[in-house]
């Protein structure tokens, strides 16, 4: 018979000693030194970023990690673009950059120097609405209004995508010019989420601007 006779108390004591030995370095001066060397926000120097937003040049000092959304909202005071998911999934922050719609929460402000940036504030004014803005009002394409700026910017750029011949997942023949159709509108706007569920009214507004009869 083997002489091995495990004793629960001794096993637990041995485990405690081993655990202490493994974890000890984490509480030592070495670990504290590593923590002190970790980067923090104060170590990042601000940079001068020139942003051309709605036709106006702005020079702002920003942390280079600042997103375009945060830079525009917090430094330029343009609060039309909304921060929804902050992960590029809801579309509330949509802006138009060089004619193309982008999720502004997923790009850094420093990356947009030299580009033409348009927010909802640059599309129209209360006294002179953009055609898409007027159509949203006419067809009640909003309820709480949180997603509306992103919806409108996305819709304006989306119609330009179709005109430019950019295909979508539902384009039947990608070698041909995509049609202005309700199916195309629904597919291309699927990245813009409306918490209130005003999708039908939004589609009515887009169809009117595009000159398409709703099914």
Image: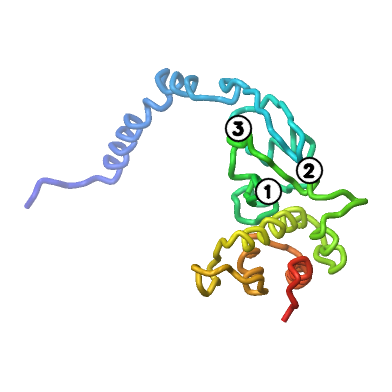
Q: Which residue is mark 3?
A: 110
Mark 3 or mark 2, which is nearer to you? 3
Q: Earlier in the sequence, mark 3 or mark 2?
A: 2
* Quadrant location, the C terminus: bottom right
Query: Which quarter of the figure has residue 62?
Result: top right
The mark found on residue 96 in the picture is 1
**Mark 3: secondary structure:** helix
Distance between mark 2 and mark 1 Cα atoms? 15 Å
Residue 208 spot, x, y in % from top left: 78, 70
Mark 1 crowdedness (10 Å alpha carbons): few <14, some 14-19, many ≥20: many
Residue 78 left/right relative to 98: right
In the image: residue 63, left or right of residue 79: left
Q: Nearer the viewer, residue 128 or 9?
A: 128
Please, what secondary structure does the residue beneath circle 1 have?
Answer: strand
Report the disc number at residue 149. none
The image's colouring method is rainbow
Residue lying at the far bottom in this picture: please name it.
215
Q: Residues within 10 Å of mark 2 (few under 14, many from 20)?
A: some
Does residue 41 appear in this view? yes
> Where does label 2 land, which residue?
79
Image quarter of residue 49: top right
Circle 2 SS class:
loop
Q: Earlier in the sequence, mark 1 or mark 3?
A: 1
Residue 96, horizontal then vertical, whole percent:
68, 48
Vertical placement of residue 67 versus 210, above or below? above
Residue 75 in the image: above or below residue 186: above
Report the Cα–Cα distance between label 1 and label 3. 16 Å
């Amino acid at each position: 018979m083997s002489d091995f006779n495990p004793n629960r108390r001794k096993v637990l004591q041995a485990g405690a000693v081993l655990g202490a030995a493994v974890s000890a370095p984490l509480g030592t001066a070495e670990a504290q030194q590593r923590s002190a060397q970790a980067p923090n926000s104060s170590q990042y120097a601000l940079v001068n970023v020139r942003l051309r937003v709605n036709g106006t040049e702005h020079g702002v000092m920003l942390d280079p990690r600042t997103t375009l959304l945060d830079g525009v909202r917090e430094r330029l005071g343009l609060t039309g673009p909304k921060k929804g998911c902050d992960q590029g999934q809801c579309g509330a922050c949509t802006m138009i950059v060089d004619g193309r719609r982008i999720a502004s929460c997923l790009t850094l402000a420093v990356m947009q120097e030299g580009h033409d940036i348009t927010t909802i504030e640059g599309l129209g004014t209360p006294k002179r609405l953009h055609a898409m803005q007027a159509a949203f009002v006419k067809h009640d394409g909003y309820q709480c209004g949180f997603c509306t700026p992103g919806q409108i910017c996305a819709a304006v750029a989306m119609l330009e995508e179709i005109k430019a011949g950019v295909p979508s997942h539902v384009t039947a023949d990608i070698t041909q010019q995509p049609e202005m159709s309700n199916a195309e509108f629904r597919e291309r706007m699927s990245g813009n989420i409306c918490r209130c569920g005003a999708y039908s009214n939004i589609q009515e507004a887009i169809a009117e601007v595009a000159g398409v009869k709703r099914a």
